[in-house]
Amino acid sequence: MAERLEPILPQVPIEGIAIHIGRAGLCMGDEAQAQLLPDGRVGIFARVKRPLLGLIPARRPTYLGHLGPVAAQVLAPALAGGVALRLRVVVLTPEHLATSGPPEIFVSVWGDPRQIAPYLHLPDLFVPPPLEDLAAVRQDPGPVHLSPA
């Protein structure tokens, strides 16, 4: 059976950016990997330009930053369970273009929702009401009459 990849988190900001975006050679569409860090956060890694001895060009996997607490809450259990995820860089704002704020990197997270669903523990707040309740709400109240003011 083939994997069905769908966007799990379409655009997630990376916090605590640890690289200089302008010099890293990072581009939109580049692949990234998510890994659990020892402190429980979800770290994002990608292949960026890091020359050997300052002269020999090389691209090495480098820590970019970590995901925020909400995105980490969704992805951390799935990563611990070994679910395959595909991450891509979708938005980059390098230092020289970030005039009104800090530089930004956003990634999109794709995966098979059938594999990720068992790891999600959504509170009751996000559970939709039963269909009977929806039918009562959708009953037609009849014509609306507006009285002149």
Image (cartoon, rainbow, N blue to C red):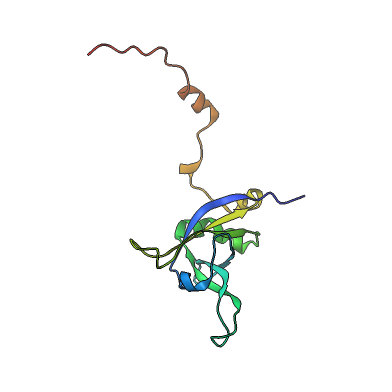
Q: Is residue 64 visible?
A: yes
Q: Residue furthest left?
A: 149
Q: Position of residue 87 (x, y in %)?
A: 59, 60
Q: Residue at x 50, y 70 (%)?
A: 64
Query: Looking at the image, which is closer to me, 61 or 92?
Result: 92
Query: Looking at the image, which is closer to me, 136 or 106?
Result: 106
Q: Residue furthest bottom?
A: 53
Q: Residue furthest right?
A: 1
Residue 44: quarter of image: bottom right
Q: Position of residue 83 (x, y in %)?
A: 65, 59
Q: Is residue 38 visible?
A: no
- Number of marks present in the image shown: 0
Q: Position of residue 113 (x, y in %)?
A: 63, 49
Q: Residue at x 41, y 65 (%)?
A: 103
Residue 29: quarter of image: bottom right
| Quadrant (top left, top right, bottom left, bottom right) of the C terminus | top left
